Amino acid sequence: MDAVIENLPTYWRGFSMTLLLLGVSGISALVLGTIIAAMRISPVASLRAFATVYTELVRNTPLTLVLFFCAIVLPYLGSDLEYETAAMIGLSVYTSPFVAEALRSGINGVPVGQAEAARSVGFGFGQTVGLIVMPQAFRMTIPPLINVFIALTKNTSVAGGFFVFELFASARELANANGDAVIAILLAAATLYLVITVPLGIFAGQLERKWVVQR
């Protein structure tokens, strides 16, 4: 444990970067995923086709390949993005179709009659989706959405392979420097991941129970 305690600043540096990746990428993926989910049910055929192709293409592409494109290919093409920014973009793009599919399952659970009633009183497509459909879809998809963000938390470790000093990269550096304390170092890193994911699961359960009672 001495190796862990002595290197707490290094852990904190990696842990704070993991939190930053999770926060920025999670919010971006939620916004982008919501837009893609709305496009999937759009009355405009071209938007539905684009959203379908985007979803199938991105979610079936390995995350390593997405981050490789953002961190290696984009700079080769002239981009001057920082590696951390490139990782946030890659994680956001990769996670957004999973958010979109979770929301689409919630949209499918909203009774069709509610959308028809909204249109009958003069609501347009945007108003119907934004005011009637999406709020209910979010309520019904809290558990799968939290699962997406838990997966995103673990996916941030892939960014460590592309010059981003996040939690896994810090653990790898410490393990290389302290070969006699590898197990303790990795267990400490795993514990810090649990510090993020366990509260997310608890929060999801509480939020779901609260909204079930309200319904």
Image (spheres, rainbow, N blue to C red):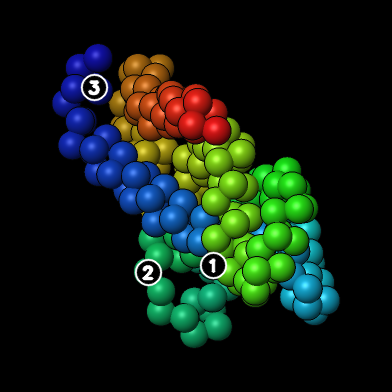
Image point 55% across, 51% down: which residue?
Answer: 135
Characterize the local packing of mark 3: few (<14), some (14-19) or many (20 or more) Cα atoms within 10 angstroms.
Answer: some
**Residue 22, image x, y percentages:** 41, 48
Q: Which residue is mark 1?
A: 70
- At label 3, which amino acid type do we have? Ala
Image point 49% across, 31% down: which residue?
Answer: 214
Quarter of the image that includes the C terminus:
top right
Q: Which residue is mark 2?
A: 82
Toward the viewer: 119 or 143? Answer: 119
Toward the viewer: 147 or 112? Answer: 112
- Mark closer to the chain start, 1 or 3: 3
Indicate whether 61 appears above or below 166.
Answer: below
Q: Which residue is mark 3?
A: 3
Q: The residue tagged with tag 1: helix, strand or loop?
A: helix
Q: Is residue 100 left or right of residue 146?
A: right
Indicate whether 142 appears above or below 97.
Answer: above
- At label 1, which amino acid type do we have? Cys
